[in-house]
Amino acid sequence: MGSNMAENHPVAFRWVAQAKLNGATLIHVDPRFTRTSAMADLYVPIRSGTDIAFLGGLISYAIENEKYFKDYVVNYTNAATIINDNFQDTEDLEGVFSGLKEAPQGSEQKYIYDNATWQYKRVEPWDPAKAREEAKKAATFAEMIQRMVPPAAEKDPTLQHPRSVFQIVRRHFSRYTPEMVERITGCPKDVFLKVAETVTANSGRERTTTFVYAMGWTQHTHGVQTIGTTALLQLLLGNMGRPGGGILALRGHATIQGSTDVPTLYHSIHGYMNHPDARKAHDTLADYILTETRPTGYWANFPKFIVSYLKSMYGDAATPENDFGYDWHPKISGDYSHMATMIAMAKGEVKGALIFGQNPATSINGALQRRALMQLDWLVVKDNFETETASFWYASPEVKSGQIKPEDIKTEVFLFPSAQVAETEGTFTNTQRLIQFHEKAADPPGDCRSDAWFTHQLALRLKKLYADSTLPRDEGIKNLFWDFDYDPGTYPTNTRIEGEPDVFKIIREINGYQTGTKELLKSFGDLKDDGSTTCASWIYCGVFPEEGKLLARNREPDPDNKPGTNLGWGYAWPANRRVLYNRASADPDGNPWSERKKYIWWDAGQKKWVGYDVPDFAATKAPDTPAKPGATGLDAHDGKSPFIMMPDGKGWLFVPTGLADGPLPTHYEPMESPVVNLLYPKQQHNPVAKHWQHEENQLAQVGDPNFPIVLTTYRLTEHHLAGAMTRWLPWLAELQPELFIEMSPELAEEKGIKNLDLVKITTKRRSIVAKALVTPRLRPLMIDGKVVHQVGMPWHWGYMGIVTGDIVNDLTAMVGDPNVSIHESKALCCNVEKLQ
Amino acid sequence: MAVVLSRRRFLKVSGAAAGTAVGGLLGLGIDVRPKQVRAQQLRIQNAQVFPSVCPYCAVGCGTLVHVVDGQIVNIEGNPKSPINMGNLCPKGAATYQLHVNPNRLTKVLHRPPNATQWEVVDLDWAMDRVAELVKKTRDETFVETLPNGKRVMHTTAIFSLGGATIDNEWNHIQQKLMRGLGIVRIENQARI
Ligand code: SF4
């Protein structure tokens, strides 16, 4: 669902084809009929942006027909846990949860949630504020965490208690009936039921079902909740932590996973630790640790992760006396995500930008982003070709049309040429969390340099410029530990490039080492919270356990691909585990659920977990180990709790903390939709969605007759993103030379459009032109008795390159998911007309 | 500055660079396939081979890079990789042209404020100038505490934006340098 795997992840799709040969059933649920649909046993059309309604229907079907995996649900999920008496569901409050309040003035959100009422009910009263006060008096971090352990949660293993998670989930989804699914999504009831029967019949002890998704699920103002719906369903069906199960995210770029883990993202620091934030109780290191640490479960080790990270930042200057340099580390105090930043830039609040291999001139609401670039004092672009972002000042549509003159654009622009993958060495992390090293094969031409070269050289210059400063504000940069030059005598001799950083030194710092001896760390189990270990990324710790033995460079596949986990090929974080939470592949007693689905199990003779993968569980913790009441970390879990990162060791059907838009997923319409929300007529879209206010960023109202058609965007096999890496390559440019719009024959006839006609596409933001591709691959849907048309557009074009075309993102709007600020480009409202 | 190829030159470049246009030529009744196989063998004869990874999507297909006399002559799928077993999709198969391509930039270009043209500049000069600009903007916009007294030690006037096909090692040092300077608008393609 939400993915056209055959065209966008084609080589991975070979394995789906292989699975089909082995008897697997393939279902494709998507607004468009694609090559993935052509390979499927069942193609299921739905309206773009209604996946939660569809998946919610599956949840309700599984519960009402008792087709969930009871042993798994009772033992491995929080189904039995009792929720706070004050919690109110969307069924009680007509589409919103308890805790909704107005957002602060000037925010991009109208409302936000306070999650106090979504919490577990404890067996005895507990006051977290008081516990925190006591904890602050502790002498060590370990003791501090100990004092924060809450009393156990109330449970009802029979799942009958009306406030048990299971009953709350059941009531929440009870109106997601097959009839409702049909009215909302346009998927005929009988087709939906076929999917529901197939999926539930294919889940249990003997069989597992997997869900595969891509941007079709994420690029929505309820993107995170769509994934959450699937997590809930997969837990109910017992498909998590088991071979052939799970939820597979097909990410889009070579190391998009790496850029998230090693985060060049404003909200997080290494290994999924939240960025220090002036809006939270993060004033001192102790405050930060108290706010961020979950005292039970593996996250109890948080103090070790953050202290080792601070040591990697500030080296010897980070000491226990100065809180390991915590005060030098910046804090965030707002949303600085891509869209928020471009809006601030358009207002003149951002003065300079460093842009590497990214192309905002063709990004969401492109015209607005280009206008923002014009407000900059300086812009650095580093890329392989001259991108739209580098050339906006003379080649953008606004300049070409004479609307703006280059002479009136003050921005100083630099364009640095880049080395490409075969001209550098380093690692990528693929969509399976697999870290792979690529070797350098040749020098890049001319002044092309690696991106690491650029950042290293910039750092050396800035360190020098600040070396003599005595200002307190410059202590952070002065103390920043920067030791990436090659050691004397080790610089490679077979290159003409000077000044490259030593990539292995960078990996050392990511992996971590003993602060004193510099000896590499073998595992994150070695980390300490006293400064004796230095480690930027606790999740990558172990990738480089010994000198000369970088595991990302491992290239030994399994013979004949058996057992097929290929533990000798690359390195998957954490600890080279290929399937996360794989303790769940065994039953509560530690035996495989079935011979067919054997993966990790307890070997009573050896007294340890064994199997085809690295066990994602304490290696020698027996299934009958009891939980230690009041303990911290994994001791708080018994031997039957596979979800080691969770405070209670259980998979969460109901999510008390961590989500901005509710503890359960709810169907909301996209921000632009031709129809009203049939489930919650009083709550059209996500109440806490983000919408950046700007005159050029307006939205069509519900059912606006000027914009009656649903538009979705997508990618083609032959191009990558806005084309910066493909539209300059003759081979690829020739294969897909031109922008087009896919539309159904019915819509084309209604609009008097013929195949290959030029068509004007208009949204509330802007109009662009594309060639018509009239095809039955798109079909009109019947939504609650009314015909709704959908069109689709690939978004690979721009004004630079061998082949050019209009920018599809000029049509999209800056609206975002409240959790992660991703935009909504998969469901917009537009109109199309033949260009006269 | 943009190099726009005419259709004629487009085909020429395409043909000269090892040809996926074979299908098209077949349509014209010309079969060059045997010669192509032979050319391919010659091309990688005596080449050094370096294992690499496809730089496009997140599947992570393994590739092999062939180098003769320091020049990349061929990039193809790595048959040993359990991910792709030698296969590549059209993008992965075109990785060679990402490297060997007449449209590629090889010099640093600079556009002064309000100018109408690019100028070619020296790499070292450009690096010095960027360092100066980063320092100037940071120093002019640095905030130590918010009006409510909360310590932030940051600037929100500089934006660092990265693509998601750049090595993890770059991501590490980029976020480290930015956070070291107090730059907090750090973003990546991974967001959107
Ligand atoms: S060859 Fe294609 S499928 Fe494989 S990593 Fe590259 S882009 Fe992805």
Image (cartoon, helix red, strand yellow):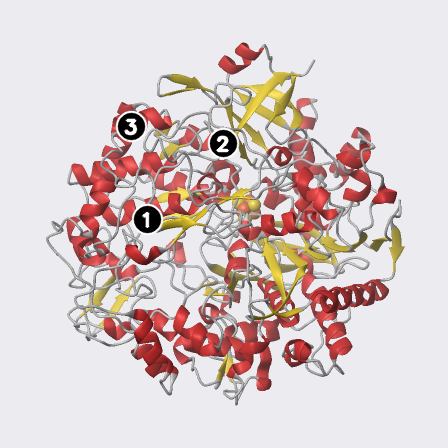
Q: Nearer the viewer, residue A331 or A568?
A: A331
The quarter of the displayed image where residue A641 is located:
bottom left
Q: CA distance from mark 2 to mark 1?
A: 26 Å
Circle 3 crowding by C-alpha within 10 Å: few under 14, some 14–19, many from 20: some
Q: Position of residue A112 (x, y in %)?
A: 43, 50
Marks 2 and 3 sit apart, C-alpha to C-alpha, by 20 Å
At x 51% / y 84%, what residue is drawn? A519
- Is residue A91 visible in the rendered image? The answer is yes
Q: Percent from the top left, x then y, of residue A621? A: 23, 73
Decide which of B44, A99 is in the foreground and name it: A99
Chain for numbered disc 2: A
Instruction: Name which residue type carries label 3.
Output: Met
> In the rendered image, which residue does mark 3 sit on?
A180
Rendering coords of residue A337 (x, y %):
57, 53
In the displayed structure, A432 sits above or below A484; it is: above
The local secondary structure at tag 2 comes to: loop
Describe the element under mark 1 as helix, strand or loop: helix
Q: Earlier in the sequence, mark 2 or mark 3?
A: 3
In this picture, is B184 found above or below A181?
Answer: below
Disc number for residue A231? 1
Query: CB at mark 2 closer than 8 A to ligand 1?
Result: no
